[in-house]
Amino acid sequence: MHNLALAMHNGGHKVTGSDDEIFEPSRTRLANKGLLPESQGWFPEKITKDIDAVILGMHAKGDNPELQKAKELGLPIFSYPEFLYNRSVNKTRIVVGGSHGKTTVTSMIMHVLKNSGVKFDYMVGSQVQGFDTMVSFSDDAEFAVFEGDEYLSSPIDPRPKFHLYRPHVAIITGIAWDHVNVFPTFENYVEQFNIFTYLIEKNGTLIYCENDEQAVKVACKARSDVKKIAYKEHPGTERNGKTYVNYNGLEVPVEVFGSHNLQNMMAAYHACKIAGVSDKDFYKYISTFTGAAKRLQKVYDKNGITMFLDFAHSPSKVKATIDAVKKQFPNRKLVACFELHTFSSLSESFLPEYEGTAAKADALSVFVNEHAFVMKGKKPFTGKQVKDGFSRNDLTTVYTIQETEKWLLHNSGPGSVVLMMTSGNFNGMNLQDLASKISENLATF
């Protein structure tokens, strides 16, 4: 939401807002633009008849006093995705959907289009190198590139966000059950993707991963006027911790690695081709893509210790990330720590979905953030529950950042690759400081 506020402000609009919690970096970025509210909380007196539009985020509740005031005054009220659609209704919309890889594919497309000189609007769920904000609008861009989240649009609009974008080019990276608090059965979850493809504009295009069984099934049900493009992992090789992709008989070095990212690259390739990017330019610019923030982001690489941070939020993502890192560094000890954070992951009935996902980690700890459980009205898991869910007896359950740090210091040795996975922030743990401590600890032996 704060990125949308910045984008509208940069476009010359008068923007105000309210929230009862404002964290970094949102606080500083809003303050730098003069947009930080004087006080946190909800102030219905701020809502007046001269407001042109109210944009409602998911954090607000249905009985929010400012929302109620806006309704009383009859003001136009938009959900975040509804507002994005209205700003891009006359553009060619490329929407990236899927249970995993959405942010990376969207970021890859943005990176290549920008460097190729193609004008486009965008919305992405992470900070991307070379872009000041995660949202941007313009009057003259032909394309709009949106990350298509399947979560609900707003407290008063229960439609999944990606149902509102009506893409001309839709991408499905893969389908693995998530958001169990909203989609209680796997079948119900999959149906959201069927609806997504149904909402593709006439004579549009569906790009989907042919290695994902559910994505293939959804693609088979798409309308006959929709052009279907299947993709799979980009051919490539790995040598000495470096990945190369094959193009026109040449080996092109790339900064990303792992089967999942090579699949993401192919999805981005097809989207960029539709946007008019040549093969030559695609490979020229994809070679310089270093990844989106918190998506297998290298946060430390010194003195024999390499640390990655990944936005792993589901069983399929945990498995893909661990497998990719182990394949990239087969001869180094992989020390993995995963924070249970999403609503799905805090549900005991969902915990068995993690069985076998971390099999390739040489050492594994799971961070049970008690505050997250309390905030969602749930009882924190016991160590036995976590071990049973992951089906791994050597797993260690940690409950504080102090315990997490102690476990990492004990299990990391010379040459270790440390993988931190969370859709949260490990209770504000400074990962670079942690990696430095691990490195210093090794130096004392």
Image (tube, grey):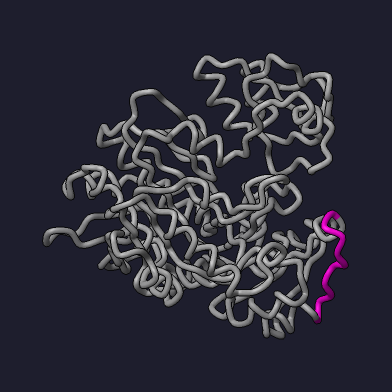
Residue 183 figure quarter: bottom right
Residue beneath the point at 27% across and 55% down: 270
Q: Residue furthest left?
A: 249
Residue beneath the point at 69% across and 62% down: 182
Residue beneath the point at 74% across and 59% down: 405
For this rendering, which residue is in front, 355 or 97?
A: 97
Estimate the x, y position of residue 430 in percent, counting from the top left.
Answer: 68, 46
For this rendering, which residue is in front, 81 or 399?
A: 81
Is residue 29 placed above or below 154 in the rendered structure? Answer: above
- Residue 92 is a magenta residue: no
Estimate the x, y position of residue 274 in percent, counting from the top left.
Answer: 25, 48
For this rendering, which residue is in front, 245 or 431?
A: 245
Residue beneath the point at 58% across and 77% down: 357
- Residue 376 is a magenta residue: yes
Is residue 153 placed above or below 14 in the rendered structure? Answer: below
Which of the image's four quarters has the C terminus?
A: bottom right
**Looking at the image, can residue 115 be seen?**
yes
**260 sits left or right of 308 in the view:** left
Is residue 384 placed above or below 93 in the rendered structure? Answer: below
Residue 249 figure quarter: bottom left
**Looking at the image, can residue 300 be seen?**
no
**399 sits left or right of 231 in the view:** right
Q: Is the magenta stretch mostly helix, strand or loop?
A: loop
Residue 231 figure quarter: bottom left
- What is the span of residues highlighted in magenta in the rendered image? 375-384
**393 sits left or right of 14 in the view:** right
Estimate the x, y position of residue 299 in percent, counting from the top left.
Answer: 54, 49
Numbered circles on residues, count:
0
For this rendering, which residue is in front, 308 or 175?
A: 175
Estimate the x, y position of residue 283 in percent, counting from the top left.
Answer: 23, 50
